[in-house]
Image (tube, rainbow, N blue to C red):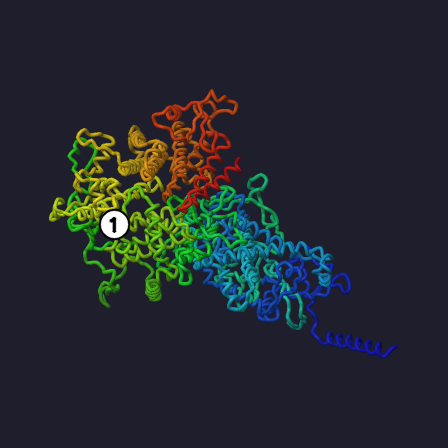
Amino acid sequence: MSQSTVLIGTLLATLVIWKLVQTWRRPPFPPGPKGRYPFMGMTFDMPSKRPWETFGEWAKQYGPIMYFRTGLQHVIVISDAKVYRELIGMRASIYSDRPPSEVGDLISGGRRSVLMPYGTRWRMVRRIFTNVLTAKKCDGYVPYQELESLATIHNMLHEPKGYAHELHRYALSVARTVAFGKRVPTSSSEFATEMRDVMENFSKAMTPGKYLFEAIPMLRKLPSFAQPWLRELEKFKNFELSFALKCYRDAVRQAELHPDRPCMAREVKAEMEKAQEDDEVQASSTCMEILGAGSETTATALHFTILALATHPEVVEKAHEELDRVIGQDRFPTWADEPNLPYIRAIIKENQRWRSISPMSFPHYTSKDDVYNGYYIPKNCVVRVNHWMMHSNYERYSNPEKFDPERFINHTQSAAASANAVDASERDHFSYGGGKRICPGIHLAERSLFMMTSRMLQTFKFGRPLDPKSGTPRELTAEDIGVSTSLIMTPGSDFDMSFEPRSKNIGQLLESEWLEKVAHQGTRPQCSTCVRRGAACEYPSRLMSPTPGDPSPDSDDHPQADCFTPPADFSEGAASLDGQQEAAQGPSPSSELFTSASSLLPSAFTSLNCEGGSNFSAPTGLEQNGDDLFFNFGGLSPDWIFSLFDPCSHLDTFSMPTDYQMLDEPVLHLAGQNSFPNAQEPSVRYSARQGPHLDNWLLSTAETNCNQSLVIPQLGGDSDRSLKHGSHFQMTKVEESQRSQLLSSAQTILERPLWKAVSLANFPSKAKLDHCIDLFFVNFRPPISFIHRPTLNPTTISEVLLLSIVAIGARFSSMPGAIVFANSIAELNRRILLLMNEQDSSHRYSEDYLTAQLLQTTHGRGSGHRILFRHSRDLRLLLVRHAREAGLFQEPKPRQNAPDESSATTESRWKAWVAAERQRRLGWAIYDLDATVGILHNDRPAFSIGDMALSLPDEDACWEAPTAHSWMALRPWQPSHENRIEFRKAARECFYPSLTDRIQLSDDQHLHVITVTLCRFLWSMKELQGSPLMDAVPEDWPLVNHKRTLLKKLDQFLTCPEAAKANKDDAILRRIVERLLIIHLCHLYGAGDLMDWLLPLLRAGGQHKEARARMSKWGVEDRGRLRQVAYHSAQILALSRSFPFNLPCESLYAFYAGGALWCATVLLGDLEPGTDTEACNDGDESHQVTVLQLDAFHLLDGEDYRKVHYWLCEGGRARVGLFGVPRLGSKESHVQVLKEALRILQNMRIWELSKGFSDFIRKLITAESSIQ
């Protein structure tokens, strides 16, 4: 034997002896099973199903801490709360590591913090989680959770079969809002589908025992071709990382546009930059973890909650009693109610104990040797915690198998406070884990669970579960459902539920809350489940395109509601989800449109050559939403197309030329009054005016000066005798702490700025401003022009008027970023107008201020931007009131001391005429804006027609005359104030022609005013017809006949646009087309209650049950009316297609017409063939039926029009069609009509409102196609 062999043998023997000595000297391992095979430990004896139950049985035999081996791996299982607290909590530095995971490293590149080793990198990621998910931060997420819970419960009520998917959508949407600043509108959206695939891939890959190399790591050293598992794992990895990067990059872009929205991606990016780490993949993986871990666990916990409530009716009864006692049935619980709802809190805690979603903890790993209670725990030992066993401890929980919330009724601590309790016996449950690896989303999860649990209990009865096959209630226990598990525990089998409101009041509350807070946002516009409505809660498409090669993560969802707008404003920023006003407590996420770090104006406007493309930074909240914060349609108010002033005593009038003054009494001479016994004098006749009309004449003139500091005066003395008397009622007294809180809150709110800083670094150059002003006058042609271009001087008009002109003009620019720039300028102007009004209320009655308000309202109407649109609604009401108070609706007349016109120069006469005509036209433009709100938004106008004392505007030729002499040349024989047409007389002349007056309404402006007035009358009759008054009036009250009379009178103003095109210039043709659109739309409003149920039906994707039932009944009530609706809708579509003029409200006409024609098509298809309809079989010969094209423009005295008119009145067999729809009433025509309306809307590109309508039509097409 060689010397070297002896030496080696000696060393080995010494090593073995030393090892044995060390083993003898160290403490023993904890007790535990040994396994059947020597040296193999428990490798072949591990439980394959429900390991926590097997470990629990072993724990009863071996004790609360046990040890075994699987192969060469040491494993410790903890089954006692005290041991858990001591090791995982108190000795976290040893037990916070994770065991090596070859699969985890392959599938995520080692970037998932849940698998990441304890160290510097893990601490960095953990710090990010901790900072973004603090209790205070999570309080800021509560408004989004409230809105999501409303949407979820509403969807569960209407689509109970999809409740499990809806729970996952809720949890995922909350998590995505926090992580990426966007919501998940439907469980079938592309994002939700891809996220589901990521989680399924991860779950498959992490299944214990799936891959051999997990047990034998040496196999990873084989060549790639010898590792067949690599292909699958690489596929999983590539899919996950590409998806994470896509979402992260999109979120970072959106975060720049929405700095006030929650966005973990923004904070992760900042933290990585702070740590000088440039690892975008790590950042994206960090953001994705909150979605995967947070959403699945929350959704599963809620699923188990429903199971518990369905199988324990006594629990539901107690919960309902507590809710009725504390909350009542007139509102939903909020997070602020949580301390007052101990039984609801107990239900949540008991559910997490009863069905812990993590019965076995994720494995911990020891970083060094340790000794506990005399037992040796080696380094690199896997440590598992048996949560299920600790939750089933009979000493800790009596009768642990039973679902009994009473056990936690006195447990008042929050989940986080309980989880960090020093004494383990004070913990409620262990579902959130412990130590340094405790669930970082504990605050968010607690709020999510409370919001859904409390609101589900507030809403639903929770009857017995339903059999998924028969749909009938069945006796069912929780044990019948069982559990299944992969990474987390889930219900073992499916069970259906019937969700019914527990009272009529609750059902009405849910619908009203949903309409007010959810439907008005986007989410989603017609928020109901995607199955029922075939549509997601969505917004108009975003303006900005993603970076080339980096598609948006939700390309199929565009446009959808990115993120709810919480009611606390806010304003995509609110939830309205939309309390959506800018509240004193500070702007909400969406109302905060600008920050000091973000530019107000796109950088594309800063260079004349427009280089740089469209990669500009849009202002916060003003970008066109892609798939985020609900551009919510829904509800009954007009902003479903997306869901303050203190009068002072001093009132200025318009600044008029010195030879003009405001009239002291009405100028209308009503000598013919006696011939109209039903009429009465307008109230304006009796308005004695010393200036503008005063509504505050009853109020004291001693007002608080809004420009001075507000000083609260002293109330009584320090020892006032009235304080010594007793109280009338025995009530709880105000405490000093509450008084201090009032003072603190008032001070904080008043000192907080209303808006963040506005950056004007990219404000456009003078040349670009001039360009926008030029485009305004070229393209913006309202039916009544009210800005006099020949005398307008941009250097002398007010800034607010100039900004209003620039904002509208920019919409017609071809420069990159024009739309966002226009919205930004409009928002800037909105803020300036508000501040001007607050700082000096006299501004509100100046001509420039009112003109700017009018332009701002018009812009907001068609902008397609939620905040501007909502502001336009409120501004319209203020505008009418301010104009009325300023005397704008009364005729100006020359002052008594004004020089005679014969002695005045032509220039001075022209300027005096322009000033008076400008005021007159401004009054009529405001009247037009308000009067058309009835048919455009189905909303009540604010102006009383009796207050209108203006004469009709002068002809356009005089108004547009460029110089005084060209103006004089048009009227050399006529004084500037004579021969005006009085409005009241002209309106009466339509119905009762007078031989003495002989008023000829030939000017298209005058025809427009009369048309709008008749339209206003018609809407008032529609409103009256739907009022309770109609239940009390005689049955023969001729209201319907009056509506028919108005419609016949409107029809007298119809003309053939094709004929007008040949004989009129574009300006006149524009007015003719708009007049025709109004008349045809009036016929839709005159068709019974069509427009009352049509809009809710469209919002619900055609699946609103009540509206659908009313539609069917409406269709058979009057078939002639049905044919009329089809004809007038087709005419509107034809006008929108053939004569588009980029009017702000063009898309409204096309959308209403498309929706009405779709309804008519459905109803025509339901009628029996051969009665008095146009239904014809395919076999009919063309010579046997009349072929009609409803959208053709026929001469009113031609044969073609007579055929159409006969069919409208009498019906009969006819084959009816229109452009793109060969046969109206056929099965295919439902979708064909919608596609034609969609095509027309998509061609309307200047005013973004059309995009929202396009998305609605697109969703309706999807729903209709699926039905066919």
**Residue type indicated by callout 1:** Thr
Locate the N terminus by quadrant. bottom right
Residue that badge 1 annotates: 791
Residue 620 shows up from this direction = no
Q: Is residue 332 visible?
A: yes
Q: Is residue 313 above or below residue 423?
A: above
Instruction: Indicate the position of residue 955 as horizontal and vertical percent values.
Output: 24, 40
Vertical position of residue 470 compared to residue 1048: above or below: below
At horizontal 53% and vertical 35% (from top left) the residue drawn is 1268
Q: Nearer the viewer, residue 569 or 472?
A: 569
Instruction: From this view, report whether residue 846 is shown above or below residue 267.
Output: above
| Camera-nearest residue between 430 and 1192 | 1192
Compared across the picture, whether 951 is left or right of 1016 comes to: left
In the displayed structure image, the side of residue 259 where residue 1014 appears, left or right: left
Residue 944 is situated, as x and y percent measured from the top left of the image, at 25, 42
Could you tell me residue 517's position as x and y percent? 41, 49
